[in-house]
Image: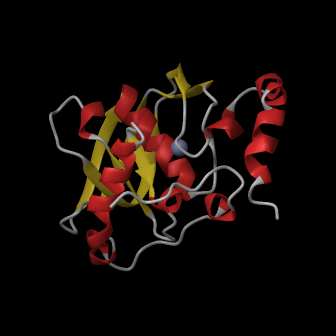
């Protein structure tokens, strides 16, 4: 089932989502999350973008170099980030019509619980690392447009205000 995607200005996207007590709570939601992500040509989707107050996200298998399938990351976190940063033009299913350059660490060490309930720790680089950071930001109530330069932000202020409008009634 395709879920409605929450957009910029929706209060759920500014929440810091609480840790999940058990990975089993999210298992029934994963398939819909993945379908919703692909329906909108996304490469990642966080739970709050789909309206769930749960601390997890899904990432498309396409961004990983090791051939893994579409994957779920539960209670994810960062352990280490590289000093090496790189820029890339990001977009977001919750911020339609806006793409901006964002600088992020190139390599990160992460931890999370996988769909089988197993604790994992691994290193992610390049696009996989970037998508992980972008989605982790969502779980903490942060948008990629919060991470762009003040000048660029000023230039898109009107567009963001326009997006927020439908939530302020
Ligand atoms: Zn996003």
Snapshot quadrant of residue 111? bottom left
State the colouring used for the structure image.
secondary structure
Residue 11 lies, with reference to residue 151, above or below; the image says below
Residue 9 versus residue 66: which sits nearer the camera? 9
Report x, y in % for residue 30. Answer: 29, 62
Image quadrant holding the N terminus, namely bottom left
Horizontal arrangement in the rendering, residue 138 relative to residue 21 (left or right)? right
**Image quarter of residue 168:** bottom right
Can you give x and y, in whole percent of width and height, for residue 159 in the image? 77, 35
Q: In the rendering, at what x and y percent does residue 44 appear?
A: 40, 44
In-image side of 93 versus 76 (left or right): right
Tell me what residue is drawn at x 67 percent, y 49 percent: 8
Please give left or right for residue 128 compared with residue 19 in the image.
left
Residue at image coords 38%, 38% = 43
Q: Nearer the viewer, residue 40 or 132?
A: 40
Quadrant in which the C terminus is drawn: bottom right
Q: Position of residue 135 (x, y in %)?
A: 48, 47
- Relative to 10, residue 137 above or below: above
Residue at 61% over, 64% down? 16
Toward which corner of the image does residue 155 lie, by quadrant? top right
> Can you say whether 138 is above or below 102 in the image?
below
């Amino acid at each position: 089932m395709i879920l409605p995607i929450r957009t910029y200005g929706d209060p759920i996207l500014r929440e810091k989502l609480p840790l999940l007590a058990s990975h089993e709570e999210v298992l029934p939601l994963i398939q819909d999350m993945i379908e919703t992500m692909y329906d909108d040509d996304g490469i990642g989707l966080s739970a709050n973008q789909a309206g769930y107050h749960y601390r997890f996200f899904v990432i498309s298998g396409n961004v990983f170099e090791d051939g893994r399938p579409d994957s779920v990351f539960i209670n994810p976190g960062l352990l280490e980030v590289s000093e090496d940063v790189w820029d890339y033009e990001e977009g977001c299913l919750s911020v339609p019509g806006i793409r901006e350059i964002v600088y992020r660490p190139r390599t990160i060490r992460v931890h999370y619980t996988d769909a089988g309930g197993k604790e994992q720790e691994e290193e992610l680089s390049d696009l996989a690392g970037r998508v992980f950071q972008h989605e982790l930001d969502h779980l903490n109530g942060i948008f990629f447009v919060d991470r762009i330069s003040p000048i660029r932000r000023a230039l898109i202020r009107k567009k963001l205000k326009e997006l927020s409008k439908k939530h302020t009634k």
